[in-house]
Amino acid sequence: MLVDHDMLVDCGTGVGDLSIAELAQIDHVFITHAHLDHIACLPLLIDTVGDMRKKPLIVHATEATLDVLRKHIFNWAIWPDFSEIPSKEAPFLRFEPVRVGECIELNGRRITPLPANHTVPAVGYWLDSGVASLALSGDTGPCPEFWQAVNAIENLKYLVIETAFPNREKQLAQASLHLCPHMLATELGNLHRYAEIFITHLKPGQSELTMREILAAIHEFRPQMLQHNQVLTF
């Protein structure tokens, strides 16, 4: 998700659709968790535009996620440690830890990590423009703490929530801490505010089936599938 022109939430393969000029403008990347589909383009992004920038790209994530990135990605074996090059004093990359519930302010925007329940340490994010807000679940299974936080967002406009599997794979969804349509319907019973709901993380090849099941389960919410290149204004 590209926010304005200078911020990403996660850094999966979709980042490859951006031009080099667009990549060079990104100053902040907020990572939900360290699974490959959420970080795949992060090493390539830094490698592509690091020498075009006058300041480091800042990667924001929990300490647990940053630890994974340091140990398993930017470790000189898989990819260079760009937090040390060209020099430790002036690197291409800087890591900044985040904590659930603690707000980061960037040019009038407020970004707050939200609780999530996944197989690895994970968060969602609350993006507040000062006018309206978007809440993003990231990858999560059932998570009462997420709904408690979302219900406290007075200017909530959009909710972007995952539903990875169709109902026939409910056991897989439960084991991997994702949602299926039946589980999504149960979770949305905890939402006490109006929001436009967009569905993300649909598995390729199953997205049409899953969306049909979602529409049948929660038609009163009028959910939409989040589309490639869709623009949400808030």
Image: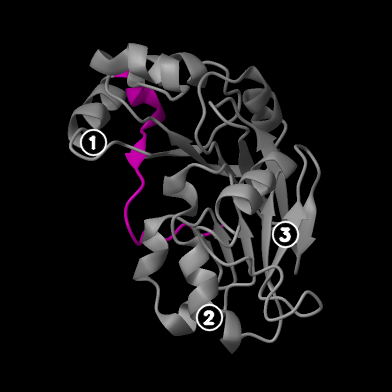
Q: In which quarter of the image is the C terminus?
A: bottom right
Nearest the eye: 141 or 82: 82
Mark toward the start of the polypeptide (2 vs 3) = 2
Residue type at numbered disc 3? Phe
Q: Mark 1 and mark 2 in contact (Cβ < 8 Å)?
A: no
Which mark is in front, 2 or 1? 2
In the rendered image, which residue does mark 3 sit on?
A: 95
Q: Which residue is drawn at 45% across and 46% down?
A: 36
x and y percentages locating residue 127 in the rendered image: 64, 51
Examine the residues drawn in magenta and state their main secondary structure: loop
Which mark is in front, 3 or 1? 3
Q: Distance between the residues labelled 2 and 3?
A: 17 Å
Please report the bounds of the magenta region as a residue range. Answer: 217-234
Q: What element carries label 1?
A: helix
Nearest the eye: 45 or 23: 45
x and y percentages locating residue 99 in the rendered image: 77, 41
x and y percentages locating residue 1 in the rendered image: 48, 57
Q: What element carries label 2?
A: helix
Residue type at numbered disc 2? Val
Mark toward the start of the polypeptide (3 vs 1) = 3
In the rendered image, which residue does mark 2 sit on?
A: 49
- Rate crowding at label 1 as few (under 14), some (14 to 19) or many (20 or more) other CA atoms within 10 Å: some
Residue 207 got which mark? Answer: 1
Residue 230 quadrant? bottom left
Q: Which residue is drawn at 42% across and 47% down?
A: 37
